[in-house]
């Protein structure tokens, strides 16, 4: 993804659950108000609720608890001090997420920010919310079969394309042959996650015309690293040294792939991609086991979701914030963000220097030597 400097949102302390439920707040970003019935009740002061739910999908990726949640809470407190955030994580269970969604409606949420476990199943949740006059913001993962009020995310298709192209450039630079049956494994995300489908599409685009064929690919249920590891283990037995690279859709599945390679005693690991810039993923890059990841300062996008929620609550037009751009995805008004590819060559500059992560967080135990080699201290 295109490089850019991202100004981080400072993480504030969590908002106490006892905050008073007062009238809707103005974000102060945009003075133009939508005409018509949509959102007009809040703008007119007739809607006295100011609870905004933030419902995340799983804990397989550490980003939701460590970055998205605090980023959302901090920005919501900033733009609407009297608003009350309602947070839940579905731990990868679509039925549990449905219960959490219904609980948010029962508690009087006026806007629900939803990162769906199952993008198809989430369409009924959107309908249920709209029947009660509640706004829904699709977050991170789109909901193609419904029409939420807004969608806020990273550009997932571009993520897939970027990590694949980065891997291909590395293989070409090393002179890795496209012949002799050599090829690439693709470890995709969950088949129930529409964002994973976009990443997968981008990976296909990134590999197209590279000369490296796809030996095999796998849609990883629930993005589960252990399932990715199990599948890659089978492919190592099947293809052996013909595997010259692995495009994994996130750091978790990438870590699973690396574990499979090491368990098979592969002497020289092929480049493996990732996504999310998790602590584990960044440490694997430092160690030289993982080739790349995607820097996704999720606090920025979560903060944008809070801004959009308050705008919808007040019936105001949404404007791009935090470096995002406005577009349309699956027929839904959308704000997309473009993060960047991270490798050893720019990890210090674009992760450490920008304080997305600190040396003390990454340079622990066996990773200290790698940090020293990269000049990270």
Image (cartoon, helix red, strand yellow):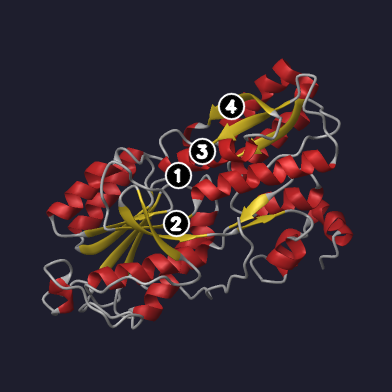
Sequence-first tag of 3 and 2: 2
Residue 335 appears in which quarter of the rendering?
Answer: bottom left
Residue 30 appears in which quarter of the rendering?
Answer: bottom left
Q: Secondary structure at mark 1?
A: helix
Res. 217 mark: 4
Sequence-first tag of 1 and 2: 2
Quadrant the C terminus occupies: bottom right
The residue under label 3 is: 201
Task: Indicate which label's residue lies in the foreground, 3 or 4.
Answer: 3
Q: Position of residue 367 (x, y in %)?
A: 80, 54
Res. 153 mark: 2
Sequence-first tag of 1 and 4: 1
Res. 195 mark: 1
Q: Going 14% across and 59% down the picture, which residue do you hit? A: 133
**Relative to residue 55, is residue 102 drawn left or right?**
left
Q: Tell me the crowding category of disc 3: few under 14, some 14 to 19, or many 20 or more residues within 10 angstroms, Cα based.
A: some
Sequence-first tag of 3 and 1: 1
**Do labels 4 and 2 touch, CB within 8 Å?**
no
**Do labels 1 and 2 touch, CB within 8 Å?**
yes
Q: CA distance from mark 4 to mark 2?
A: 25 Å
**Do labels 3 and 2 touch, CB within 8 Å?**
no
Q: Position of residue 29 (x, y in %)?
A: 36, 81
Sequence-first tag of 4 and 2: 2
């Amino acid at each position: 993804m295109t490089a850019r400097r991202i100004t981080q949102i400072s993480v504030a302390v969590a908002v106490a659950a006892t905050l008073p439920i007062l009238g809707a707040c103005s974000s102060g970003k945009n003075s133009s108000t939508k005409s018509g019935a949509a959102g007009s009740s809040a703008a007119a002061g007739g809607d006295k609720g100011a609870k905004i739910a933030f419902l995340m999908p799983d804990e397989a990726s550490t980003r939701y608890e460590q970055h998205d949640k605090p980023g959302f809470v901090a920005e919501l407190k900033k733009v609407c001090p009297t608003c009350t955030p309602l947070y839940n994580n579905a731990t990868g269970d679509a039925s549990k997420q449905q219960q959490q969604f219904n609980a948010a409606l029962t508690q009087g949420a006026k806007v629900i920010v939803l990162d769906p476990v199952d993008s198809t199943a989430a369409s009924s949740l959107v309908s249920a919310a709209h029947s009660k006059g509640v706004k829904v913001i699709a977050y991170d993962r789109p909901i193609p079969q419904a029409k939420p009020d807004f969608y806020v995310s990273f550009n997932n298709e571009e993520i897939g394309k970027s990590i694949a192209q980065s891997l291909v450039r590395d293989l070409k630079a090393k002179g890795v042959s496209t012949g002799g049956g050599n090829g690439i494994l693709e470890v995709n995300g969950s088949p129930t996650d529409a964002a994973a489908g976009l990443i997968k599409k981008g990976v296909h685009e990134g590999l197209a015309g590279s000369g490296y064929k796809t030996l095999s690919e796998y849609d990883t249920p629930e993005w589960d690293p252990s399932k990715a590891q199990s599948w890659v283990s089978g492919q190592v037995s099947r293809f052996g040294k013909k595997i010259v690279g692995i495009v994994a859709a996130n750091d978790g599945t990438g870590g699973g792939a690396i574990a499979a390679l090491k368990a098979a005693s592969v002497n020289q690991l092929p480049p493996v991609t990732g996504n999310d810039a998790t602590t584990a993923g960044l440490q694997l890059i430092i160690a030289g086991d993982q080739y790349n990841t995607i820097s996704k300062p999720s606090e920025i996008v979560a903060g944008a979701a809070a801004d959009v929620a308050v705008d919808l609550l007040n019936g105001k037009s949404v404007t791009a914030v935090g470096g995002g751009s406005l577009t349309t995805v699956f027929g839904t008004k959308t704000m997309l963000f473009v993060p960047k590819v991270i490798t050893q060559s720019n990890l210090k500059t674009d992760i450490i220097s920008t304080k997305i992560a600190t040396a003390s967080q990454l340079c622990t135990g066996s990773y200290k030597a790698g940090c020293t080699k990269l000049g990270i201290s």
